[in-house]
Image: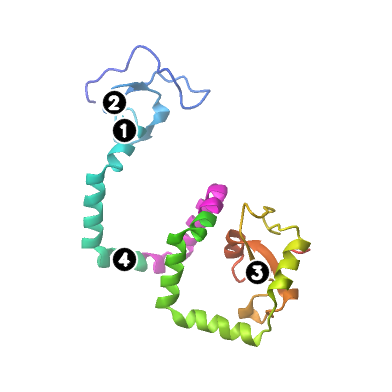
Amino acid sequence: MNGRKQPAYPPEEHATPDCNCTGKICSGCGQTKCLGFFHRFILSHDGHRSKCIVCRKGEWLNDERRTRKKEAYWRDHEATREYQKNWYRQNHERAREYRRNSYRKNIEAEKTYNAEYSRSDKGKQRFKRYYERHPEKNANRRNIERGAGTYTTEEWIELKETYNYTCLCCGKQEPDIKLTPDHVIPLAKGGSNTIDNIQPLCITCNKRKGTKKTDYRR
């Protein structure tokens, strides 16, 4: 124990409506706050950190600490990347399940972030650098599309009008999202590149569908 007594009066605000804790004094800002505003810490006498979430976040976001973290990251960059790759190879299914659960818990925030990032200059530059490093992937797709047929811009616009500019998976409409052509039967699995094999999906739903044969037009 650090010798600090719990306050005799409750905090002014609780983290949840049904909370009736006596609160705790934050060692950072000195305010009495509900225990819900502290991170849990099993080694502490009351099971919570001594500083509240706001104070701890301020420490994490200061420029000095960011600089130290960047220096440490690039100093051990190769070793860290190698460790991450080895762990992913050994725990492939566990990592995928963790990512799926995280996506399901924050699905709306994930969709919003992915849509905004794909349209941002940073996202476009990242995709451009990726295809510059792996030109064979872009070339392979173009070769597959040439042999699988084509469709015109007018056909794509007419298809979007048919479905009222709506993503057939999540139900959102343009201009809130950006519709992209998705192959019902993927090109990699023998699907054609004609308009009868195309369905309008937003960028997020298109990426999540991946190479599955899912027809949302039904």
**Residue at point 44%, 21% (across, down):** 13
Tell me which amino acid carries mark 4. Answer: Arg
Cα separation, mark 4 vs mark 2, equals 38 Å
Q: What label sits on residue 182 in the rendered view? A: 3
Q: Secondary structure at mark 1?
A: helix
Foreground mark, 3 or 4, reads 3
Mark positioned earlier in the residue sequence (4 or 2): 2
Q: How is the image coloured?
A: rainbow
Tell me which amino acid carries mark 3. Answer: Asp
Q: Secondary structure at mark 4?
A: helix
* Residue 8 visible to an observer of this rendering: yes
Q: Which residue is mark 2?
A: 29
Q: In this rendering, would 47 be left or right of 218?
A: left
Placement of 108 over or under 34, stated as above or below: below
Q: Are marks 3 and 4 in contact (CB under 8 Å)?
A: no
Tell me which amino acid carries mark 1. Answer: Cys
Placement of 123 over or under 144, stated as above or below: above
| Image quarter of residue 7 | top left
Predominant SS of the magenta segment: helix
